[in-house]
Image (cartoon, helix red, strand yellow):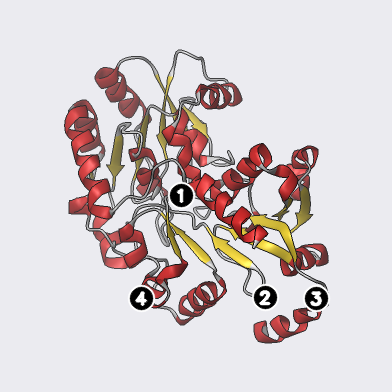
């Protein structure tokens, strides 16, 4: 069926490729976020007159504000979307181009991916469906952005082994934000959630599991906040951000100390605005570690996760303090050693071959402008 659709849609090849047209999509059309957003914003600021920007969304009305910036906002499942996808000079996506789109030789596909570092293994790593998806993604990708050498070696091994020239080991555009001072981000997040300026934010961002119940995600918020205040001073506000695949859990319902930030579009803004991060196996900890802000691992189901999915980089090599129950989490927060953590984070970045320098977005757009003129 997919092969039939691919061939049918080649009828759109009657329309020429427009070299300066750029189609963006993030999180499979769910949001305006991640590296595609930061590339899009850079183009708006620096070379808007050179490119035509189109964004694809499942709910385009939610992002109508982009039209005021001169960006076309298009429903993802529409003939217009297919037309733009098949006629764009550049396709930029953090998951890979849709499997039903027949990519043309004159098109440049930039896959920014959506995770940094090299931690949990790829979802359903061994299934035939996933292998087919990865093959299509690799075949249609012109450039694959990598955050570090370890990611290139492990997460995109097919390219690393067969087409290393496709890998842009430049860091993630979405992480450039951590290499500058952006006080407006803190003000924006606090205003959005009505958080007093003097209060600090702890962000709890657990990742997705296949078959985990609410108990795995449940933290004693009062004890966490008390431990953070004791160690770092000041009053903390608890922001909760579930993975978009986790679903609706009721483990924090009616807790007045919890602010649900799951639907906030930009994870990087939440990370930037927070004073501390608690997660489990999410690659957002790679992003946060670039700022050296305190990062803690809460992993009550570590044994199950190791047996079910495992990691590319063993947990013993991670620089982040780890706890497997609430008592241990309190302890590692109160005993947090900033100097030791910074040294461990530097070691970790070096061992994984970090390419993060705060220049990834500029590098991508410079390449696009070069290709545009070629």
Judge depth for marks 3 and 2 and give the one in front: 2
Percent x, y for residue 334? Answer: 21, 26
**Of 4 and 223, the residue lying toward us:** 4
What is the quadrant of residue 168 in the picture?
A: bottom left
* Residue at (25% x, 21% y) in the render: 231
Q: Secondary structure at mark 2?
A: loop
* Residue at (71% x, 55% y) in the render: 56
Disc 4: which residue:
161
How packed is label 4: few (under 14 Cα within 10 Å), some, or many (20 or more)?
few
Quadrant including the C terminus: bottom right
Residue 336 seen in the current view: no
How packed is label 3: few (under 14 Cα within 10 Å), some, or many (20 or more)?
some
**Of 57 and 127, the residue lying toward us:** 57
Residue 172's mark?
1
**Of 163 and 200, the residue lying toward us:** 163
Counting residues from the start of the chain, the first of labels 3 and 4 encountered is 3
As measured in the structure, the alpha-carbon distance from the residue carrying label 3 to the one carrying label 4 is 33 Å
**Of 89 and 290, the residue lying toward us:** 89
As measured in the structure, the alpha-carbon distance from the residue carrying label 2 to the one carrying label 4 is 24 Å
Q: Secondary structure at mark 4?
A: helix
Disc 3: which residue:
12
Counting residues from the start of the chain, the first of labels 3 and 2 encountered is 3
Disc 2: which residue:
104
């Amino acid at each position: 069926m997919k092969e039939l659709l691919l061939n049918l849609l080649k009828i759109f090849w009657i329309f020429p490729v427009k070299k300066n047209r750029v189609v963006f999509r993030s999180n499979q059309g769910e949001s305006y976020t991640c590296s595609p957003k930061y590339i899009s914003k850079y183009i708006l600021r620096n070379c808007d007159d050179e490119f035509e920007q189109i964004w694809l969304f499942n709910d385009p009305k939610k992002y109508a504000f982009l039209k005021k910036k001169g960006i076309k906002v298009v429903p993802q499942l529409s003939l217009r979307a297919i037309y733009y996808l098949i006629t764009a000079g550049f396709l930029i996506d953090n998951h890979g181009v849709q499997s039903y789109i027949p990519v043309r030789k004159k098109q440049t596909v930039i896959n920014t991916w959506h995770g940094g570092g090299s931690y949990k293994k790829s979802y359903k790593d061994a299934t035939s469906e996933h292998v087919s998806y990865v093959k299509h993604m690799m075949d249609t990708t012109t450039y694959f952005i990598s955050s570090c050498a370890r990611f290139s070696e492990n997460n995109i091994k097919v390219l690393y082994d067969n087409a290393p020239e496709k890998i842009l080991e430049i860091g993630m555009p979405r992480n450039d934000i951590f290499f500058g001072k952006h006080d407006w981000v803190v003000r924006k997040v606090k205003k959005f959630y009505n958080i007093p300026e003097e209060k600090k934010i702890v962000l709890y961002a657990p990742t997705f599991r296949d078959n985990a119940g609410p108990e795995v995600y449940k933290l004693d918020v009062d004890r966490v906040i008390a431990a953070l205040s004791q160690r770092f001073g000041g009053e903390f506000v608890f922001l909760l951000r579930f993975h978009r695949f986790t679903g609706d859990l009721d483990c924090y319902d009616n807790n007045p100390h919890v602010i649900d930030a799951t639907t906030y579009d930009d994870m990087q803004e939440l990370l930037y605005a927070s004073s501390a991060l608690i997660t489990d196996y999410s690659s957002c900890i790679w992003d946060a570690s670039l700022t050296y802000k305190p990062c803690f691992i809460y992993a009550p189901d570590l044994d199950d996760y190791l047996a079910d999915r495992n990691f590319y980089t063993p947990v013993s090599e991670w620089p982040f303090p780890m706890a497997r129950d609430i008592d241990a989490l309190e302890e590692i927060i109160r005993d947090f050693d900033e100097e030791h953590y910074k040294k461990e984070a530097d070691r970790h970045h070096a061992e994984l071959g970090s390419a993060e320098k705060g220049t990834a977005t500029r590098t991508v757009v410079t390449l696009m402008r070069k290709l545009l003129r070629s």
